[in-house]
């Protein structure tokens, strides 16, 4: 079993038997491809119910709340904690973060974070689960229904697969969204369910998936990276900071994706606030050499030109 301190790239391959057993028990929703498609597109279609229930203020506010709380569960939890380990927290808080992320209806934390590690290992190369080089639709949502990426990649997420509560949540990932749907109905009745869960979940899906699709196609590139990642303000605003995707691909170990004060990164502000009250700690940030204006880019260029000089010599 891997230790928590190991980096994803250093993790050994899982024994064949272990990997197999885990994938087979990966939850009925994941393994029933047709059903997951029906649920996904059914929730999209159910958004039309806003024409039936109207737009009561409480229900719309509930939508805004469940959207932003769950965006943070995905960005601050699934992404910056489980996939990249950019900060530390306790075991109870770890489960709470996983549960909030799971309520976003994007499968379990081990599946999500494991596939994201695969994305970083092989960004825009064969083996990347969601490169736009395989088509925009594939990178946005098609890959989720591709049987190739259906099971949890235990070999790359062993550091968290050692926690039975996370394995349970990963396997029963429908529990969190269902709990949220019931809560929304209890708070706001049918309009509460439609806005707080159905509309909010659909918006959240596409905001998250834009990071995988558009943030590799549309925006600026500060750093020279081997992938097509880009920085995009619009995506950063809708995803609480994940739009600074070129920064992130250049230095994924950082809990902060907006490297400069003008790069709005709400997830970072929330993580910082949580650290002040002691719920999370050891937040990693980019070293000065990266943060110093545009030096990071220049350094890459210098390094590249030096290599070129060496090669030419
Ligand atoms: Zn990416
Ligand atoms: Zn990442």
Image (tube, helix red, strand yellow):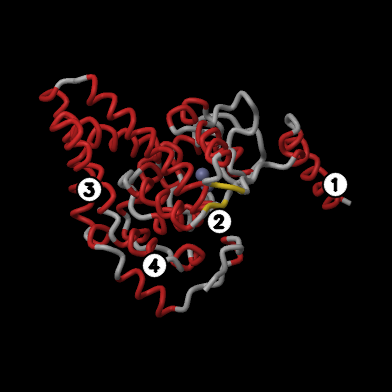
Taking depth in this image into account, of 225 and 270 the one nearest to the observer is 270
Local packing at callout 2 (Cα closer than 10 Å; few below 14, some 14-19, many 20+) is some
Q: Which mark is residue 12?
A: none
x, y percent for residue 85: 56, 53
Separation of residues labelled 2 and 3 (CA atoms):
33 Å
Check disc 1 and report its element: helix, strand or loop: helix
Asked if residue 119 lies left or right of residue 283, the reply is left
Query: Does residue 140 appear to the left or right of 124 in the view shown?
Result: left
* Disc with the residue nearer the chain's start (1 vs 2): 2
Category of crowding for the residue at label 1, using alpha-carbon neighbours closer than 10 angstroms: few (below 14), some (14–19), many (at least 20): few
> Is the Cβ of the residue at disc 1 closer than 8 Å to that at disc 3?
no
- Between disc 1 and disc 3, the foreground one is 3
Q: Is mark 3 within 8 Å of ligand 2?
A: no
Identify the secondary structure beneath mark 2: helix
Q: Which mark is residue 178?
A: 3
Q: Nearer the viewer, residue 279 or 228?
A: 279
Residue located 51% across and 65% down the image: 159
Q: Which residue matches tag 2?
A: 121
N-terminal of the pair, mark 2 or mark 4, is 2
**SS state under label 3:** helix
Q: Quick one: label 1 or label 3, which is nearer the N terminus?
A: 3
């Amino acid at each position: 079993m891997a230790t928590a301190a190991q980096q994803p790239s250093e993790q050994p391959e899982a024994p064949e038997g272990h990997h197999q057993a885990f994938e087979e028990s990966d939850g009925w929703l994941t393994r029933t491809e047709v059903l997951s498609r029906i649920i996904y597109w059914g929730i999209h279609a159910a958004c039309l119910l806003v024409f039936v229930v109207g737009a009561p203020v409480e229900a719309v506010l509930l939508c805004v709340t469940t959207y932003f709380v769950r965006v943070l569960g995905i960005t601050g939890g699934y992404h910056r904690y489980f996939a990249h380990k950019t900060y530390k927290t306790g075991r109870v808080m770890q489960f709470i973060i996983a549960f909030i992320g799971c309520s976003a209806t994007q499968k379990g934390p081990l599946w999500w974070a494991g596939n994201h590690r695969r994305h970083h290992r092989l960004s825009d190369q064969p083996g990347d689960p969601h490169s736009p080089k395989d088509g925009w639709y594939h990178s946005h949502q098609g890959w989720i229904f591709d049987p190739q990426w259906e099971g949890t990649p235990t070999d790359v997420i062993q550091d968290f697969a050692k926690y039975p509560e996370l394995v349970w949540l990963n396997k029963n990932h429908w529990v969190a969204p269902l709990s949220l749907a019931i809560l929304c109905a209890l708070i706001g009745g049918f309009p509460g369910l439609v806005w707080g869960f159905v509309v909010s979940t659909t918006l959240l899906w596409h905001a998250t998936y834009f990071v995988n699709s558009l943030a590799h196609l549309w925006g600026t590139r500060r750093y020279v990276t081997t992938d097509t990642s880009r920085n995009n303000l619009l995506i950063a605003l809708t995803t609480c900071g994940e739009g600074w995707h070129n920064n992130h691909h250049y230095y994924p170990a950082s809990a902060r994706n907006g490297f400069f004060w003008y790069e709005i990164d709400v997830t970072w502000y929330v993580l910082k606030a949580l650290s002040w009250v002691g719920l999370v700690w050891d937040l990693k940030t980019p070293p000065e050499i990266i943060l110093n204006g545009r030096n990071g880019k220049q350094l890459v260029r210098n390094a590249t030109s030096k290599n070129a000089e060496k090669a030419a010599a």
